[in-house]
Image (cartoon, helix red, strand yellow):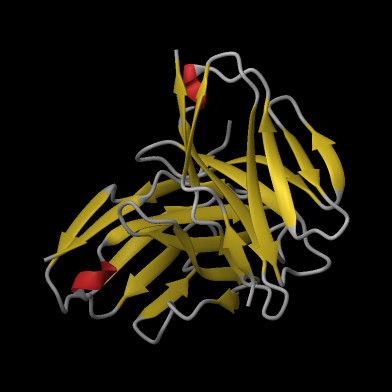
Amino acid sequence: LAKTTQPISMDSYEGQEVNITCSHNNIATNDYITWYQQFPSQGPRFIIQGYKTKVTNEVASLFIPADRKSSTLSLPRVSLSDTAVYYCLVGDGSNYQLIWGAGTKLIIKP
Amino acid sequence: EPEVTQTPSHQVTQMGQEVILRCVPISNHLYFYWYRQILGQKVEFLVSFYNNEISEKSEIFDDQFSVERPDGSNFTLKIRSTKLEDSAMYFCASSNIGGGSSYEQYFGPGTRLTVT
């Protein structure tokens, strides 16, 4: 079964770049790796997805090495409003179920 | 912007009772999901639904759980006989493409289920 590992928490300061890495093995070979953001008492919100190499959108970048055993979410110039929990989501390589990481609680300080 | 809605926002029930959690997915979406999140823990996949049938389900989704799309708009999760450990936030999500984690899912605000 697929297994994911993320840091439990991270702290940073406004204006800094933050990188959050998720390790994942036994993931589906033909599926994307997706990251979500969740604020307290809200449902998760899609941030970015990728298959390999680097993907960038208006809010984040996602780096995925060739072996796809990890992915790194990069948030440029964070602000206080980026304080949230960030989850990686992968498809299991054997049964294609959706496996969520445990989440990384990111706290941004002024 | 279209959004997923869920009702009720909070449901309190006694152990052994049946509950139905309701969701209205985004109208042109075809794939529907239920997730559970126990307080302070990670999101857990329960079930995905497409073309009026379950496409994937997790070990959590046992015989006590069922899902239904009774009409063209609602998507429901039924728990037949609630247990204390069913207390959690339940999220509904929908996407217009499915089949894995690939596709952006839109989540509702959740229903907090409290079993006493």
Residue A64 seen: yes
Write down the quadrant of residue B48 in the picture: bottom right
Residue nearest the viewer, comparing B20 with B44: B44
The reply to whether residue B103 is visible in this rendering is: no
Above-or-below relation of B65 to B116: below
- Position of residue A7 measured from the top left corner of the image (x, y, whole percent): 53, 48
Q: Residue furthest bottom?
A: B63
- Number of dots carrying numbers: 0
Residue B51 location (% of width, % of height): 65, 71
Q: Quadrant of the C terminus of chain B?
A: bottom left
User: Is the residue A17 above or below the residue A40 in the image?
Assistant: above
Q: Position of residue A67 (x, y in %)?
A: 84, 60
Which is more toward the observer, A19 or B112?
A19
In the picture, which quadrant includes the N terminus of chain B?
A: top right
Q: Return the residue nearer the eye: B87 or B98.
A: B87
Residue situated in front as seen by the camera: A44 or A104: A104
Q: Position of residue A100 (x, y in %)?
A: 55, 59
Left or right side of B83 for B44: right
Q: Which residue occupies 43% across, 36% down?
A: A39
Residue occupying the point 16% across, 79% down? B16
In the rendered structure, the answer to whether residue A86 lies left or right of residue B115 reads: right
**On screen, A99 above or below A110?**
below
Residue beneath the point at 88% across and 55% down:
A66
Q: Quadrant of the rendered structure where residue B100 is?
A: bottom right
